[in-house]
Structures are given as structure tokens and as C-alpha cells.
Image: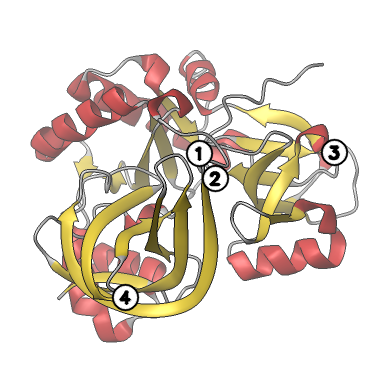
Amino acid sequence: MILVTKKLVEGYFVITTDELIFEVKGIIHPRNRIIAYLRYAPATNERHHSNIDYRKIYALDEREDFLRNRYPSYLWFSETHGRIMQSVPKDKIKSVYNPVEYLASLRTQTETATKLGRASVKLSEKLVEVTDIDWSDIGITGSQLVGTEREDSDIDLVVYGFEACRRFYSELAKNIKSIKGVERYSGFLLDEHVNFRWGKHNDLRNTLKEIERKKVLQGLFEGYHFFVRLVRNPNDLDFAYGDVSFQEKGQRLVSGKIVNDSESIFTPCEYVVECVNPINLRKLVSYRGRFTEQVSNGMDFEAKGRLETVIDHKKNLQYFQLVLGESPTDYLIPK
């Protein structure tokens, strides 16, 4: 079997020949590898996928430790990124999980689907109707996609393509309050949500509650938490892997002003900024969905993350950016 790997982007999952399940990160990848983070590992030593009981590994540092101790071939020093990355060699990909194909299949099986599956289809139908995107633009990702869901799992949706994502967000922002069955976070559920996402930042709790309360791409539907990722396609980009490289500069606390939030709805997301220290800080970026919709144009901000130098070889540019979300102590707030 020949696996199609050219279009693997955020939201897709792959299972490897070692029976590990990785979540694909980002949109572009090196020639022989897919940049992806370990998400599930077998809880037993069974070798047949249908019999494997998987356990979820959530923390990024725990995932890396697991691979270093047991499967070091999935840790790779990227010359482009200037550091070790979690990734899957293409010759170790056993199966590919496609979110759009999975949702299409689930829509034909609603009579036999679980309550979670039926709710996921119903929510997808409402969102497609309200936002007028094509069914080929939307899928289900997360635990449902790889078959590790529980009945209390979340509904993780993903929308693909620049134009579809823009239309989806614009229409959802205008109509979310009128979609029957969709609830925004408030009260106790908002408190729980903030605890889950930002548990290391009790000192910023009130600010983070106000940010999370206003976000459009999340909420509850028929009692299930849901989150929607908006993801570009590779052909939406004007650069390829290796056109830009990075040099790590360590953790940094920075402040400045948001000057362009137009990419803040996507995963990965970015914010263009003006900053005094370091003076050449140009962007805040994150591969974590929690940093979408976080701050807006004109806001003064404070952020903590990993600073790196960006070298754009095509445009002959060099600047700093702050990467958010690799540590649980990272944050981004208005000031």
C-alpha cells in the first residue's frame, strides 16, 4: 500500500510501524519526515492494532521523554529549526487518519454511531449550514478520529483552506448566539475550562477568564465541549520547508503592541507586533489552539515563551519571534 503523505497537515494523525499514534503539527514538512507530536502510546505490549489499549500522553515534555527512552528514532535534530523535533520518518508511517474522510463516513453511520458521534455530526451540520462552507472543507480530529474516544470526550473539528476558514469564522462570529444547542462558556463551566487550559496561571485568572469567555471557536453542544481548528492548506502558503530557518534564544518575557491579528484565528496562529525589548521582535506564534483569538489589534500585550531568530532566506530578512505554548508556563494577555 502506498500512503499519500504530501497533504498531511494539522488535524491529521498517523499510526507508525511501532503502533504509536502521532498528531501532525503545522502545514509544511521536510522531504522524508512529517513533523508530528506523539499523542497515544500502547498501554500494553500487544502488537496488533485492533487489540491495543492506548494511553494518552498529554504534556509535551512527557512525550519527548517517552520517545527518548523507548523510540529515539522519532526525535530528530532539524537544521531548519535549530533544535530536536518530534517527527515521523515517512517509511515508518503505517496508516493515515484523514479528518474529512472520517466525518464523511460518520455521516453515513449515524444510526450505529455513539451519542458522541451523533452529536459531532449534528454540530457539524449546523456549522456547515450557518457558515456555508463545503463538506469537503470540514472534518473531525482528536480522539474520535483515531478511535480512542470515551463517551465524555470532546468534539474536535477542523476546517481546511484559507478562504473556507475566513468565511467560517466570519459567519460563525455573527451567528453563534443563534445556533440552537450551542452554548458559550460561562459560570462554573468557564471556571473549569480556564483551569484546564491555564492551570499554571492563577495570578492571571480573571484576565484569562474574560479572554476565554469571548472566544468564538469553542463552547458546548449537547453537553460536549467542542473546539474548531482553522487550518490553511499547503497551497495557501508562498514558501516551502527550508525557505525559513530558526535559531533558538531561550525563554523570554516580552511586551509590546499588537499591530496585525489577521492570522490569529488559524492553527498555527500568529500575531504581528511592535516591541521595544527585544526591538526586532516581529511576531508571536503558536502551534497550540489555546492561543487563537487571544488578543486583538491595537492591544498592548505581555507574553512569555521561547524566543528565536527567524531567517527568511527568500526575502533576505531576519527578525525575532516568540513561540508560545511549548511550556505550561507560557501565556499571552492584554495589558
**Dot 3: few (<14), some (14–19), or many (≥20) neighbours within 10 Å?**
few
Circle nearer the viewer, 4 or 2: 4
Is 97 drawn above or below residue 316 in the view shown?
above
Question: Could you tell me which secondary element the residue under label 3 belongs to?
Answer: loop
Q: CA distance from mark 3 to mark 1?
A: 21 Å
> Foreground mark, 4 or 3?
4
Q: Name the kind of residue labelled 2 in the image.
A: Lys
Horizontal side, residue 154 vs residue 148: left or right: left
Q: Position of residue 231 (x, y in %)?
A: 40, 35
Choose mark 3 or mark 2, whichever is in front.
2
Image point 88% across, 37% down: which residue? 48
Q: Which residue is mark 3?
A: 17
Measure how far apart labels 2 and 1 are at the Cα level. 5 Å
Residue 278 image label: 4
Q: Where is 101 relative to 311, above or below?
A: above
CB under 8 Å between discs 2 and 1: yes
Circle 2 residues within 10 Å: few <14, some 14–19, many ≥20: many
Q: Position of residue 62 (x, y in %)?
A: 67, 69
Q: Amino acid at mark 4?
A: Pro
Q: Earlier in the sequence, mark 3 or mark 1?
A: 1
Q: Which residue bears the numbered disc 2?
A: 25
Q: Amino acid at mark 3?
A: Thr
Q: Does the rendering let one see residue 18? A: yes
Identity of the residue furthest to the front in this view: 316
Residue 258 numbered tag: none
Q: Say whether residue 269 is left or right of residue 152.
A: left
Query: Three-letter amino acid code at disc 1?
Result: Glu
First in residue order: circle 4 vs circle 3:
3
Residue at label 1?
Answer: 10
Query: In 3D space, how far apart are the residues under numbered discs 4 and 3 (Cα atoms)?
Result: 44 Å
